[in-house]
Image: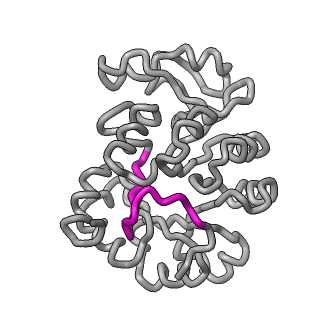
């Protein structure tokens, strides 16, 4: 079944990998080196988190606070872009990355163009600015925006359907009613709820299926289960291990 939204495909693999916050085992999460390493290893997607600065700019950072992954203190939303760009976002990981800085969304889009796809997890965003930045970078075919149903409707409206949107489906949602209400281009499903029947349902609607296999689910037997069920993408914190597992299982290569 042909999916309704045609994404850029860096590979011909039937199951594609989404690296959670980039290659965060090898480089500081959500930074340029974490994305570079994903590209280097042939990973098709990176999941990155977006937040707004005090002066209304989008930056790539998971936490609401600066404390964990920078040498700064306090909330992201209480600092200007200039203040955030002056921070060290690499020393916490290792001395090798001392001086690494937070990325802006604009920089990220420009760097990833033609190289890798982006799952943009919208922690706090300004919809008009987000849509404009994606469209100005001509990255429509390399981005899926993840967020609340309300945000997705706004992104759809503002982009006139040119930007793909995704949110989470849960088994207590009636699939047919949910699709009619949300109209997603892709759907995220927690690993325990990924079944062949639900993947086939979404595929009949032309919707991409992402299996979220983080935490306790992030292991070989779960990866094999969701791949067998028909997931198009698997989100993982262990992209290299997943790539090897799928290769061994005869799916990825």
x, y percentage for residue 145?
Answer: 62, 53
Q: Could you tell me if residue 61 is visible in this image?
A: yes
**Magenta highlight range:** 6-20
Q: In this view, does 7 lie above or below 21?
A: below
x, y percentage for residue 76?
Answer: 61, 27
Magenta segment's dominant SS is loop
The furthest residue to the left: 248
- The residue at the point 27 percent across, 50 percent down is 240
Q: In this view, does 231 lie to the left or right of 87?
A: left
Magenta segment includes 82: no
Q: In this view, does 42 lie to the left or right of 123?
A: left
x, y percentage for residue 196?
Answer: 41, 82
The C terminus is located in which quarter? bottom left
Viewer-proximal residue, 15 or 219? 15
Q: In this view, does 116 lie above or below 246?
A: above
Magenta segment includes 15: yes
């Amino acid at each position: 079944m042909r999916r309704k939204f045609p994404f850029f495909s860096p590979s011909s693999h039937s199951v594609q990998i989404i690296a959670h916050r980039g290659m965060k085992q090898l480089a500081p999460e959500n930074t340029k080196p974490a994305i570079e390493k994903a590209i280097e290893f042939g990973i098709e997607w990176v999941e990155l988190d977006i937040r707004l600065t005090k002066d209304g700019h989008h930056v790539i950072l998971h936490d609401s606070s600066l404390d964990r992954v920078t040498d700064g203190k306090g909330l992201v939303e209480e600092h200007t872009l200039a203040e955030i760009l002056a921070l060290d976002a690499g020393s916490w990981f290792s001395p090798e990355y001392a001086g690494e800085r937070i990325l802006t969304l604009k920089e990220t889009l420009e760097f990833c163009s033609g190289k890798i796809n982006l799952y943009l997890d919208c922690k706090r965003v300004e919809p008009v600015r987000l849509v404009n930045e994606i469209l100005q970078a001509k990255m429509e075919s390399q981005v899926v925006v993840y967020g609340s149903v309300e945000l997705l409707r706004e992104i759809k409206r503002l982009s006139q359907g040119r930007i793909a949107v995704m949110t989470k489906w849960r088994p207590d949602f009636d699939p047919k009613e949910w699709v009619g209400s949300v109209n997603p281009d892709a759907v995220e499903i927690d690993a325990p709820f990924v079944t062949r029947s639900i993947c086939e349902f979404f595929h009949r609607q032309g919707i991409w299926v992402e299996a979220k296999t983080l935490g306790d689910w992030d292991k070989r037997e779960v990866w094999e289960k969701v791949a067998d069920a028909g997931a198009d993408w698997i989100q993982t914190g262990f992209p290299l291990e997943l790539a090897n597992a799928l290769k061994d299982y005869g799916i990825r290569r």
